[in-house]
Image (spheres, rainbow, N blue to C red):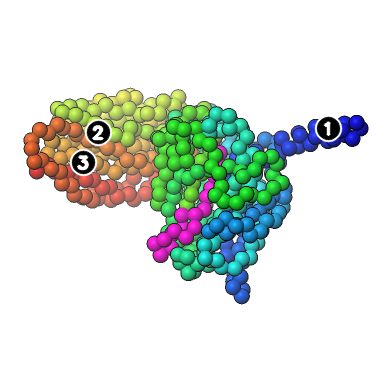
Amino acid sequence: MLRKLLYTILILVALPFASRASHITGGEMYYRLVGVNNGQYQYAFTLRLLQRCGSNRQFPNPTWISIFDKTNGTRINDFTVNISSQDNISITNPDPCITNPPQVCYDVAYYNFTVTLPASAGGYIISSQVNYRIDGIDNLAPGSSQVGATYTAEIPGLTPVTNGPENNSAAFTGSDLVVICAENDFTYSFAAEDADGDELRYSFCEAYASTSAGGNSTPTGPPPFPSVPYNQPSFSSTAPLGGAVQINPNTGLVTGIAPGQGTYVITVCVEEIRNGVVIARQRKDVQIQVADCNIAAASLLPEYLLCRNTQTITLANQSNSPLIISTDWEFYNDVNANIYSFSGPVATYTFPMIGVYTTLYRFNYFYYQSISGFCPQLYIHRYLSYQTNQFFGWHYLCTRHSQFMALGLWRTIHLNRCFIYTKPNVHLSCNWYKECTINCYRHKRLQRYYYQRCYYN
């Protein structure tokens, strides 16, 4: 009886510590090649884990590292690693153009370890799991209150390229300190660097769950690793933030309109491509917080459509931030003469004739001149192509958004004419033309503008 009572007390004492462990908000694993000796390849690895500041949680210490044969999932080795160092990162000066900016702060743990392996035909997968992720992730299926995470890195084999093992993994370089406001435009960089010069290709991919429940005291189970259960059809591994958010496969830049307020898990995979073939795939997995905030941004719709005989266009900034005090619009013709000016949130203009027009939208223009620390003036400088039914055109345009976005956000606007053709044997032929180089506002960055003219004949 006494033994049973003592056992119960121990469980009750241990439970609070178990509940405070982990609850990780993100992680990644990367490595560099140290050297080769007698056919043995030595790699220096880093496992990087994040959790929110003030969570009263503990990083797993030590954590398990597992090595598997990539071809068949055979377990090669398991060992534990202690935390090497810890850091704290946060946004200390929120952007003045954000209303009700959230706190963005993470505690970061680094686990450094060395792995020595012979070259193999298929390569290796290095993994580590944690239990659990944070609670209440909105893009996971209901009832997924306790879902773990598995973080991996891949070492290439001798096939399909013989120098595959001579590899430094792609390493993500984008900042984790990003403010994302619900139902607002945003950018999040998942850019990576590759010391070997391999081509990199980015995509959304499935977030891995842990392979076992409970604490962090067990090694990872063998691959393939299980995916977290997404809340479909609204969210999936390839659309973790919904259909209004995309990732650029060449740059790793995530852009779009954020979903509603909440917490979302997003995983980006970057493929290392050497000699035209994929040799390895690395991953970064984070739970992002979409906050109840508002951005004072210069944001127009991505497309404006004028149909039939319509010659009038109405433009309005899509941002309704209370920090926008004044708005100004200017329209110019093809010889850069000002043909229309208006001060107000919505500008309506009727094209007098076919041609190419330019519109300049800006807000807080005069306030920026006089008030220190005020949300500064921001610009959109765009081409509007009003054409006859002989062709219609697209123009790539320059947009300057709020400073909180990394390096600004360059967006595309379309102004199209739509027509109904009933003539038989009508076909469309398209050609690309290159416009002049233009110095965009604010960033002083030279961008090239392209448009496509499509002729009916």
- Image quarter where the N terminus lies is top right
The residues tagged by marks 3 and 1 sit, at their Cα atoms, a distance apart of 75 Å
Crowding at mark 1 (Cα within 10 Å: few <14, some 14-19, many 20+): few
Q: What stretch is highlighted in magenta?
A: 271-288
Q: Is residue 32 visible?
A: yes
Q: Which residue is drawn at 47% across and 41% down?
A: 237
**Relative side of 291 to 183, left or right:** right
- Image quarter where the C terminus lies is top left
The residues tagged by marks 1 and 2 sit, at their Cα atoms, a distance apart of 77 Å
Which x, y percent locates residue 187? 45, 40
Q: Against 326, is 446 above or below?
A: below
Front residue of 3/208: it is: 3
Q: Against 191, is 160 above or below?
A: below
Does the segment drawn in magenta span residue 276? yes
* Residue annotated with mark 2: 331
Considering the whole magenta stretch, tell me its main secondary structure: strand
Q: Residue at x 8, y 41 (%)?
A: 425
- The local secondary structure at tag 3 comes to strand
Identify the mark nearer the N-term, 3 or 2. Answer: 2
Which x, y percent locates residue 410? 37, 43
Q: Which of marks 1 and 2 is in front?
A: 1
Contact between marks 3 and 2 (CB within 8 A): the answer is: no
Q: Which of marks 3 and 1 is in front?
A: 1
* Residue annotated with mark 1: 8
**Relative side of 236 to 131, left or right:** left
Kind of residue at badge 3: Gly
* Residue annotated with mark 3: 393
**Relative side of 201 to 78, left or right:** left
Kind of residue at badge 1: Thr
